[in-house]
Amino acid sequence: MDLLDRDGLTEREFLEQYRVGDYERPSVATDMVIFTVTDAEPDSYRKLPDKELRILLIRRGGHPFIGKWALPGGFVRPDETTEQAAARELSEETGVDDVHLEQLYTFSDVGRDPRTWVISCSYMALINSDQVQLQAGDDAADVAWFKVSYRLLWERKELIKDGYVKTLEYELKLSIEGEELTAIVDRTVAVKVNSTSTTYSIVSNDGLAFDHAKIIACAIERLRGKVNYTDIALHLMPQLFTLTELQQVYEVILDKELLKAAFRRKVNDLVVETDHYTENAGHRPSRLYRRSLED
Amino acid sequence: MDLLDRDGLTEREFLEQYRVGDYERPSVATDMVIFTVTDAEPDSYRKLPDKELRILLIRRGGHPFIGKWALPGGFVRPDETTEQAAARELSEETGVDDVHLEQLYTFSDVGRDPRTWVISCSYMALINSDQVQLQAGDDAADVAWFKVSYRLLWERKELIKDGYVKTLEYELKLSIEGEELTAIVDRTVAVKVNSTSTTYSIVSNDGLAFDHAKIIACAIERLRGKVNYTDIALHLMPQLFTLTELQQVYEVILDKELLKAAFRRKVNDLVVETDHYTENAGHRPSRLYRRSLED
DNA sequence: GCAATAGTGTCTCTAAGACAATATCGT
DNA sequence: ACGATATTGTCTTAGAGACACTATTGC
């Protein structure tokens, strides 16, 4: 049963004598887009607070991109998977480990890291604000939860030979008290007879390190897509929540308003009602729900 | 504007003196799942041929996994992206370059390659049988287009503390004249209060190298998912095709029968009718369509 | 009572499922 | 004429969008 290769070696013999060639290898890192939802300050008494979608960024303390903000991340070790590396980073950075974690995309543009050849496998994590202590950082001047806004600025469709090219330009705005980062990201879809390809490019970028504006854009689009056909948004909710709060989270993710009746029908199977209600709200109390673990 | 780091260096100075550390780096490869559709031999005169979904595999000529079949792939070079590496492999292997190419997932299980630490960024390509010459290989005894079948064998749901674990077991069968490879792949979805995670594992595997059964399963699931809400299947069609042929392609991908009337309504916006018809079919001729380049 | 939110009812419109009826070729 | 496929029609059902109406609290 032991097959021999051209040199007459068995597989075991081959592996014993195997030496890693000295061709060049990249560093492989993971970068994480960690989302959570927070409450804004309510405008007036008895009004419900607005929800805000936020992601965690870290200010770089060394070159390259010193002083710029970057996604949390780090290099993958030989004894772990990229997913384990991402979970490790997440735990180090936020102290949380039971979260929704999902691989996004692997970025490998030549020159994306000016130091050396680095390929980044990006992940998205969703945390509810119960789990993580915001602003509580110790030396936290260099770690912050930025409010996210991602809006389509314009789109253009250009006909070419055997197809067309469609360009969508988005503005990504990340803000905290006293600081605002803005990046413009293009998504270009080239449709030809036999192929369709999509590429992202950074048009301008103020304050974000590396190609992280692309990674964040990619994460937001994934999140927006999945919100519509999965229960992914429930990972951003605390244990108990009202349907209005859930709807606000959907709205802040999708950046558009939803109809109440239709929304409640839609999420009906994703949640379970409890016997608890909100109190002292200045208006009619609301039933509290929890995530359904059925299906 | 030139910020200095702790050592008093500007970014330029830092990059000039930067040396790659000697911590371990992985090799990064791309593996490609290349799909196409072929016609089976028709049973009788005047019957339409059935469609078959196929992928390209290469028989390994050296250790490890000598004699087993593997996905085409190769290592990524420092001057190219993973996508360019995939396109290069595809072109070398099939001679085709204007195809639908899409990143799937990055696999990094420890020990997935017995030689050394290899992380694989997998891609899926869709080509139509017009573009590639099947069976035409020169030294093609070691390259073959395997017919694909991927079926759910059973599913189980087990309740655990704070959630449940759902396991779906699939049989992946790859066959050519005189050879059949079978792998059993489990997809396990663990749903807990704060997290949902999905993992694939290979239960048994007869004839496929590395973890390629997982990669193929991942590709088929992506293809099945996208067929329902994109025009991705049209990349498997020749320039001109009948709606019945298109329906057969959908059916062989999804492994289930569709209703004709509903199917035609659904794909109506994805195709454009032409003035051509099939001829000499032994029955009523069918209008030929082409892929729509609108939307 | 009033402001604000909670929760439900219903009409319409669209898309999908199911099935049937008719059309048109090659032999 | 017959076998096989092509193409269209329509009834039903499910879901989303739109909008309106009633309910309930704290102040």
Image: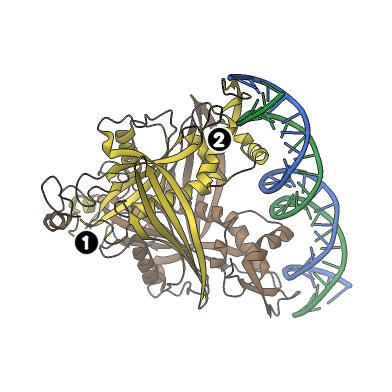
Chain colours: A brown, B yellow, C blue, D green
Q: Residue B128 or B86: which is nearer the viewer?
A: B128
Residue A162, given in percent of the width and then of the height, sits at 49, 25
Residue at x-position 61% and y-position 75%: A240
Task: Work out whether residue B191 or residue A241 is closer to the camera in this orientation and state it.
Answer: B191
Q: Position of residue A288 (x, y in %)?
A: 66, 75
- Left or right side of A58 for A239: right
Amino acid at pointer 2? Leu
Q: Using a 10 Å C-alpha cutoff, classify the residue at mark 1 as few (fewer than 14 neighbours), some (14 to 19) or many (20 or more).
A: few
Quadrant in the picture for residue A237 = bottom right
Q: Work out whether A294 lies above or below A274.
A: above
Q: How far apart are marks 1 and 2 (CA)?
A: 64 Å
Q: Does residue A67 appear in the picture of this structure?
A: no
In which quarter of the view is residue A102 placed? bottom left
Q: Which chain carries label 2?
A: B
Q: Tell me where residue B150 appears, x and y as whole percent.
A: 46, 50
Q: Mark 1 points at which residue?
A: B7
Say which residue appears at 67% left-offset and 38% top-offset. Answer: B261
In the rendered image, the vertical position of residue B94 relative to residue B11, given as above or below: above
Mark found first going from the N terminus, 1 or 2: 1
Q: Is mark 1 on a helix, strand or loop?
A: loop
Which amino acid type is shown beneath numbered disc 1?
Asp
- Mark nearest the camera among 1 and 2 is 2
Is residue B149 visible to the viewer in this orientation of the structure? Answer: yes
Q: Between residue B123 and residue B21, name the one nearer to us.
A: B123
Q: Which quadrant, please, contains the C terminus of chain B?
A: top right
Q: Where is residue B143 in the image (x, y as percent from the top left)?
A: 30, 38
Residue A114's place in the image compared with B43, above or below, is below
